[in-house]
């Protein structure tokens, strides 16, 4: 079971067409979504999260179509989304913000309140639970964003640039979170961080100009790298190969 | 506890509560509100609810602030499974609670200022106030969705306050009845005009419809999914129609009403007693003084009968249809309002009844100059009132102390003469009092 796009088209108001009749399905398991800036990664994840609505075509997950009004609630219940920019809710502590996100996803207040502390603990922010969210650093706020997606039990977790601004130790914590999620939910992570792909993810998807250029296992992706690629640069080499060598990160 | 941590702790209603409640208490303890309630719940409810001039703007501003928080947190850009009503309700519930608490506080403080208050607050007025409160909160939320909080809060606070206080300064007078329920209501002898309770509630419903439509078409408003196609526009059009209809209906209800939202109080409310032949009726707020009032009034009626004033069938607090057969009297709960004050009020009203009663006297004896005739008629009426009060049982000492010496002088002289002379003076003075130019 995975999220599927069938001839999906999306265009921002007075902007270019970002996705043009895209048909594609994320593979189940842990998937990393790679692509240059402006490739359409954020749009793709927002469509999958139902934060955006495709102008044409359909998005579906577990037989649910978010464009069908009666299915939207259940769809959103099953899909967790961490947007690229996490905004602190004014006046709320970290725990309140995470709990509020859970409540917005349909949890009872009690469940959300209890679950918020557990979610913050998973991202290493339990000590900051009672601190104002607005006082956190960018990296800490991003971890709050991750906690917001963890607080409710989703079957699909979508994260847009969750590791941007995280230091190596925090990225290690994040990897652990993704590994833990593997048993309970499919995960799609959009990122520019390519180190340790094989340790964290099962699949790689490369998107460029709204087109899926590659989809396969991490091993298949690595295999695309030129033979003479240095051992620490295999992912970069594969990525460059997928994009035809002309596209930068 | 969880409820408190998840929504209200950081809610604007929490810091606003002590300020608003202090303002409300200060307002309802002012003479303007608490001065003339006299145990009458309808008046007390109307006065307490008039605190909406502060409650509505503050709660609406809190709602605007809460909408601003949702905007800044970009909740509208997220993927909630809860619908827009639930999300708004969670943010606005503490604000609504503050509004209801402030209304309840106003009622409680007003109640504390009454000696006794038989019955209950007027539910119609309270219901209208609650509808108005909800509408203003909805309006604040809508404005908060459209404008940044830094602009929305002051705009709502000042705009809402002006909406409440400015109409009473405008003509036509009925405009004020569209924004506040039971404006200017009531003395004990009057009841609230029902249309003036319904009209502001109707206008508020129209406002609420516009607010909901404005919030619905706003892209930033958090909701489960975007509204399909043309629904927001149809909704907005429907809201405009609803607002037009409700406002028109409200105007029809109060069009022609004067400055106060009052009508005559039903005489069926009166509580009566029949001691010694004269039926005495008072409003239920004064029922505890009925026995004392009946005794004093009966004694006064008997004394006045002896000087030639025909006794009435009934002496009542209701001011409807006063005449020689139905005298009026004023009663107060205040213990400082004594038997002497009762007698004075009785004879003061009686004087007017006697002067205005049909009579066979011509006007040939009246001064030809209207100004002189009026002056003499006024003086005669004042003298008559004082004389009647003393003859009805008021002490001469008190009457002299509280009367203009120019008026008291002839009254004091005649009170020292024989009963026959006094009766003649009474009839002559009554004839002079009837010389008022018409």
Image (cartoon, coloured by chain):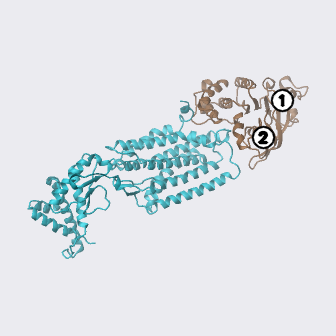
Q: Are marks 1 and 2 on the same chain?
A: yes
Q: Quadrant of the C terminus of chain B?
A: bottom left
Q: Is residue A86 above or below residue B107?
A: above
Viewer-closest of B164 and B105: B105
**Dot 2, crowdedness within 10 Å: few (<14), some or many (≥20)?**
many
Identify the residue shown where x is 25% and y is 62%.
B325
Where residue B434 sits in the image (x, y, percent)?
A: 22, 69
Q: Secondary structure at mark 1?
A: helix
**Count the marks: how many?**
2
Q: Is residue B146 above or below residue A74?
A: below
Q: Say whether residue B407 is left or right of residue B87.
A: left
**Residue placed under numbered mark 2 in the picture:** A59
Residue A195 in view (yes/no): yes
Q: Nearer the viewer, mark 1 or mark 2?
A: 2
Viewer-closest of B116 and B114: B116
Image mark 2: chain: A
Q: Which chain is cyan?
A: B
Where residue B219 sits in the image (x, y, percent)?
A: 66, 47
Residue A80 in view (yes/no): no
**Dot 1, crowdedness within 10 Å: few (<14), some or many (≥20)?**
some
Viewer-closest of A212 and B257: B257
Give the label on residue A1, or none.
none
Image mark 1: chain: A
**Residue placed under numbered mark 1 in the picture:** A236
Where residue B341 sits in the image (x, y, percent)?
A: 22, 52
Q: Mark 1–mark 2 contact, CB under 8 Å?
A: no
| Quadrant of the rendered image containing residue B371 | bottom left
Q: Say whether residue B179 is left or right of residue A56.
A: left
Please name the color used to draw chain A.
brown
Where residue A245 sits in the image (x, y, percent)?
A: 87, 35
Q: Secondary structure at mark 2?
A: strand
């Amino acid at each position: 079971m995975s999220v599927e796009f069938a001839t999906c088209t999306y265009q921002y108001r007075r902007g270019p067409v970002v996705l043009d009749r895209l048909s594609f399905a994320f593979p189940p398991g842990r998937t990393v979504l790679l692509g240059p800036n402006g490739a359409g990664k954020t749009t793709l994840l927002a469509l999958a999260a139902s934060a955006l609505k495709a102008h044409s075509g359909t998005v579906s997950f577990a037989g649910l179509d978010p464009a069908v009004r009666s299915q939207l609630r259940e769809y959103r219940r099953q899909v967790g989304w961490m947007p690229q920019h996490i905004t602190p809710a004014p006046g709320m502590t970290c725990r309140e913000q995470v709990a509020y996100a859970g409540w917005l996803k349909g949890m009872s207040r009690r469940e959300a309140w209890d679950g918020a502390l557990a979610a913050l603990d998973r991202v290493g922010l339990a000590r900051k639970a009672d601190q104002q969210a607005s006082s956190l650093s960018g990296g800490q706020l991003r971890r709050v964003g991750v906690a917001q997606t963890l607080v409710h039990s989703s079957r699909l977790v979508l994260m847009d640039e969750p590791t941007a601004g995280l230091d190596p130790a925090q990225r290690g914590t994040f990897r652990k979170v993704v590994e833990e999620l593997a048993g309970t939910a499919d995960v799609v992570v959009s990122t520019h961080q390519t180190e340790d792909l094989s340790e964290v993810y099962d699949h790689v998807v490369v998107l460029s100009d709204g087109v899926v250029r590659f989809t396969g296992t991490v091993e298949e992706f690595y295999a695309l790298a030129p033979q003479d690629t240095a051992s620490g640069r295999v992912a970069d080499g594969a990525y460059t190969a997928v994009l035809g060598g002309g596209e930068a990160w | 506890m969880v409820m408190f941590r998840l929504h209200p702790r950081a809610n604007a209603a929490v810091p606003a509560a002590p300020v608003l409640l202090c303002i409300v208490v200060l307002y309802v303890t002012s003479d303007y509100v608490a001065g003339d309630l006299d145990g009458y719940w309808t008046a007390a409810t109307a006065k307490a609810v008039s605190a909406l001039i502060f409650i509505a703007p503050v709660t609406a501003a809190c709602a605007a602030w809460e909408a601003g928080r949702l905007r800044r947190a970009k909740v509208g850009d997220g993927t909630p499974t809860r619908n827009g009503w639930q999300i708004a309700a969670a943010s606005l519930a503490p604000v609504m609670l503050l509004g209801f608490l402030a209304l309840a506080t106003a009622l409680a403080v007003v109640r504390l200022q009454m000696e006794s208050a038989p019955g209950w607050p007027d539910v119609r007025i309270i219901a209208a106030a609650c509808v108005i409160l909800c509408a203003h909160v909805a309006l604040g939320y809508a404005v908060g969705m459209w404008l940044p909080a830094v602009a929305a809060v002051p705009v709502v606070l000042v705009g809402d306050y002006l909406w409440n206080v400015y109409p009473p300064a405008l003509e036509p007078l009925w405009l004020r009845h569209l924004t506040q329920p039971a404006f200017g209501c009531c003395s004990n002898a009057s009841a609230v005009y029902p249309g003036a309770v319904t009209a502001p509630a109707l206008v508020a419903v129209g406002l609420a419809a516009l607010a909901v439509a404005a919030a619905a078409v706003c892209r930033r408003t958090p909701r489960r999914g975007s509204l399909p196609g043309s629904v927001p526009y149809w909704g907005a059009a429907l809201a405009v129609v609803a607002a037009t209809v409700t406002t028109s209906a409200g105007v029809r209800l109060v069009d022609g009403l004067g400055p106060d939202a009052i009508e005559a109080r039903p005489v069926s409310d009166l509580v009566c007693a029949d001691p010694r032949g004269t039926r005495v009726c008072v409003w239920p707020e004064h029922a505890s003084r009925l026995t004392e009032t009946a005794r004093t009034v009966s004694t006064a009626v008997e004394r006045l009968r002896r000087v030639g004033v025909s006794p009435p069938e009934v002496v009542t607090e209701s001011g409807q249809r006063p005449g020689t057969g139905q005298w009026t009297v004023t009663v107060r709960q205040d213990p400082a309002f004594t038997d002497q004050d009762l007698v004075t009020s009785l004879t003061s009203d009686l004087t007017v009844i006697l002067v205005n009663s049909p009579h066979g006297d011509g006007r040939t004896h009246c001064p030809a100059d209207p100004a002189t005739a009026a002056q003499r008629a006024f003086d005669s009426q004042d003298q008559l009132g004082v004389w009647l009060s003393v003859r009805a049982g008021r002490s001469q000492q008190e009457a002299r102390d509280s009367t203009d010496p120019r008026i008291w002088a002839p009254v004091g002289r005649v009170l020292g003469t024989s009963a026959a002379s006094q009766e003649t003076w009474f009839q002559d003075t009554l004839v002079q009092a009837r010389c008022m130019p018409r």
